[in-house]
């Protein structure tokens, strides 16, 4: 069993795990306890390569990436070890950074592309000026985006920052890339859903009066100066998330945690209805976790 090298937890038999070591140990299963952020953090520990299957448990926090409650841990582990669990490979994005001449800017692990599970964001940060970003799809110049920035997200990330900026909801099993503007100057600039085979390049335009800050899955990474760019493509290393395989993995009936109702439904359908109140009228009642809300 391994824990992060920065963790203060050191039970007997536990070894520290450093994601930057070249000789990474073989890990068969990742278990996360907490909210959606714990899964994104697990993805960042393997941000230059393949990820082992991830089994995620909610500790009371609700989220889109939490198919199991902590009370169902024994049953969920039984399904995993018996081979009856199902896995959803959630798409990730591979990102590389380039200077004005197109030369690769090395990251924390040499020249390896960095992987993101939700989104990569170019934004103006603390600058009072709008950013100007040239967006390319393949070799074709798509547009000159003027605004607070751009979000490029996966289907999993479509219900995160991109959704808050008016982006579409995309089913996590779809192979697509979503590009969403942040507070664009043009009212006609809308989100785009592109095929996963698309290569995207975002370059800071010379008209931009300040560097653009880059965030990956909510974590600040670096700045891009004028002429520098980031290239984004579908990653060869998805995030294999273990799903609830049967209603037996739900908590006991007397546990009012929001997971009991709809335990046998598709997790995504349950989530957009319960967490986003999808298509719920302001005047009509909505059912939230089995309870009627007016």
Image (cartoon, rainbow, N blue to C red):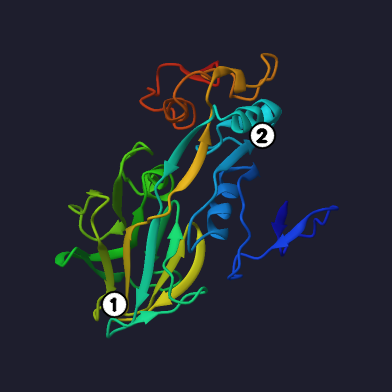
Q: Is residue 253 above or below residue 278?
A: above
* Direction from residue 66 to residue 120 in the image, left or right: left
Q: Is residue 255 above or below residue 149?
A: above
* Direction from residue 86 to residue 206 in the image, left or right: left
User: Residue at left 66%, top 25%?
Assistant: 75
Q: Quadrant of residue 111?
A: bottom left
Q: Nearer the viewer, mark 1 or mark 2?
A: 2
User: Residue at left 53%, top 36%?
Assistant: 242
**156, 289: nearer the viewer:** 156
Could you classify mark 2 by the number of other residues whose Cα lies within 10 Å: few (under 14), some (14-19), or many (20 or more)? Answer: few
Q: Position of residue 49 (x, y in %)?
A: 48, 60
Q: Quadrant of residue 179?
A: bottom left
Q: Position of residue 157 (x, y in %)?
A: 41, 47
User: Which label's residue is closer to the chain start, 1 or 2?
Assistant: 2
Q: Position of residue 53 (x, y in %)?
A: 54, 44
Kindly state the secondary structure of the residue where label 2 is placed: loop
**257, 268: nearer the viewer:** 268
**204, 176: nearer the viewer:** 176
User: Residue at left 70%, top 14%?
Assistant: 254
Q: Quadrant of residue 122?
A: bottom left
Kindly state the secondary structure of the residue where label 1 is placed: loop
Q: Position of residue 205 (x, y in %)?
A: 25, 76
Q: How many marks?
A: 2
* Direction from residue 256 to residue 95 in the image, left or right: left
Query: Any mark on residue 60, and which?
Result: 2
Q: Which residue is mark 1?
A: 208
Could you classify mark 1 by the number of other residues whose Cα lies within 10 Å: few (under 14), some (14-19), or many (20 or more)? Answer: some
């Amino acid at each position: 069993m391994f824990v992060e090298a920065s963790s203060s937890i050191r039970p007997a038999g536990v070894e520290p795990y450093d994601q930057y070591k070249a000789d990474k140990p073989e890990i068969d299963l990742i278990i996360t306890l907490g909210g959606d952020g714990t899964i994104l953090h697990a993805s960042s520990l393997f941000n230059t390569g393949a990820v082992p299957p991830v089994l995620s448990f909610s500790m009371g926090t609700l989220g889109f990436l939490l198919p199991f409650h902590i009370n169902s841990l024994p049953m969920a582990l039984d399904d995993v070890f018996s081979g009856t669990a199902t896995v959803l490979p959630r798409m990730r994005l591979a990102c590389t950074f380039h200077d004005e001449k197109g030369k690769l800017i090395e990251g924390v692990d040499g020249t390896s592309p960095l992987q993101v599970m939700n989104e990569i964001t170019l934004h103006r940060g603390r600058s009072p000026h709008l950013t100007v970003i040239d967006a390319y799809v393949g070799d074709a110049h798509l547009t000159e985006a003027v605004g607070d920035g751009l979000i490029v997200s996966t289907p999993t990330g479509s219900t995160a920052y991109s959704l808050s900026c008016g982006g579409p909801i995309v089913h996590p099993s779809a192979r697509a890339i979503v590009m969403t503007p942040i507070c664009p100057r043009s009212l006609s600039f809308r989100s785009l859903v592109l095929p996963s085979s698309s290569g995207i390049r975002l370059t800071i335009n010379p008209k931009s009066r300040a560097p653009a800050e880059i965030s990956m899955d909510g974590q600040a990474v670096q700045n891009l100066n004028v002429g520098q760019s980031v290239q984004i493509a579908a990653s060869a290393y998805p995030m294999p998330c273990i799903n609830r395989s049967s209603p037996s993995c739900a908590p006991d009936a007397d546990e009012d945690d929001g997971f009991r109702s709809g335990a046998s439904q598709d997790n995504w359908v349950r989530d957009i209805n319960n967490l986003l109140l999808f298509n719920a009228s302001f005047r009509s009642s909505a059912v939230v976790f089995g309870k009627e809300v007016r």
